[in-house]
Amino acid sequence: MSKPPMARLDRLLANLGYGSRREVQAMVAAGRVVLDGVALKDAGARIAVTSDLPARMTVGGQPVDPPAPLTLMMHKPLGVVCSHTEAGQRIYDLLPRRWRLRDPALSTVGRLDKETSGLILITDDGPLLHRIISPRAHVEKRYLAHLDRPLSGGEAAVFASGSLMLDGEDKPLLPARLEVVDPRTVRLTISEGRYHQVRRMFAAVGNHVTTLHREAVGGLELPPDLEPGAHRVMTPGDIQRVFGA
């Protein structure tokens, strides 16, 4: 069994966004950092970084934030951008302020555009992020879309053909599955992540998406009790479900 990684206490808490190392050292000196019921006094002490640390350590009386790697699921609301730099309210603004200062930084796994809601994953685990978005992984994404006009009837065959070309591209889309809910409501499952792909697919067949909501990533579905703007730390089982569809 491999030993857990070790980290200096001041560096660990600084990387979790609790402040500069000098600020963390002051917190430790004031007895505000407690591990297994004992106030720590040495900011340079080396701490085992284990997944159960939030159950064992408190900072200012509150459980310490989960150490890296941290992966979240969020119910992205409308009107929020998935960017660190784009103007407007950002998805990261919905997280605790401290989490925006973490190192390594949290990043969305792919993006949903400003006018799309639903399930999005956020992580500081680079290998996991690239594993999910890799074209070789073919992790499926399922969307619920409402359309401006009724379906013509041939869309499912076109999307499943693997020959649909998007405007401005020279490579056809991989086959996608269309489930008709009603003449203007569909579920579409894709295994790629091209720019505005779902909206552009319907534009290619002469329709327009009026609302778009992502219901699932792989085998992980958006929990019905996760309200817009809310997030939840993903368990190992949740991560497995992403690859289990």
Image: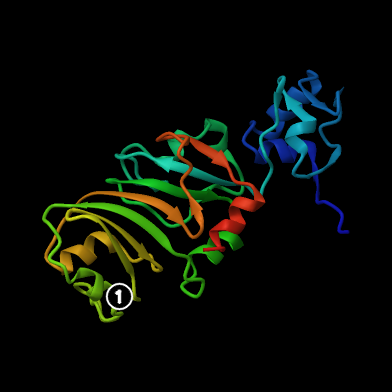
Residue type pointed to by label 1: Ala
**Residue 218 percent coordinates (x, y):** 49, 60
- For residue 141, side relative to residue 197 (left or right): right
The residue drawn where x is 80% and y is 19% is 31
Q: Which image quarter: residue 208? A: bottom left
Residue 163 sits above or below residue 83 on the image:
below
Query: On the image, numbered disc 1 is attached to which residue?
Result: 160
Label 1 residue SS: helix
Residue drawn 45% across the image and 39% down it: 224
Q: Position of residue 15 (x, y in %)?
A: 66, 41
211 to the left or right of 235:
left
Viewer can see residue 125:
no
Q: How crowded is mark 1: few (under 14 residues within 10 Å), some or many (20 or more)?
A: some
Colour setting: rainbow
Q: What percent of the width, then of the height, locates residue 150?
A: 12, 57
Q: Quadrant of residue 207?
A: bottom left
- Image quadrant holding the N terminus, namely bottom right
- Closer to the camera in the image, 85 or 138: 138
| Front residue of 209 and 94 | 209
97 on left or right of 176: right
Percent position (x, y) of residue 155?
20, 69
Q: In this view, does 184 lie to the left or right of 14?
A: left
Q: Can residue 78 be seen in this view?
A: yes
Residue at point 56% right, 47% down?
105
Rendered view: 210 above or below 199: above
**Total marks in image:** 1
- Give the answer, above or below, for where 145 lies relative to 60: below
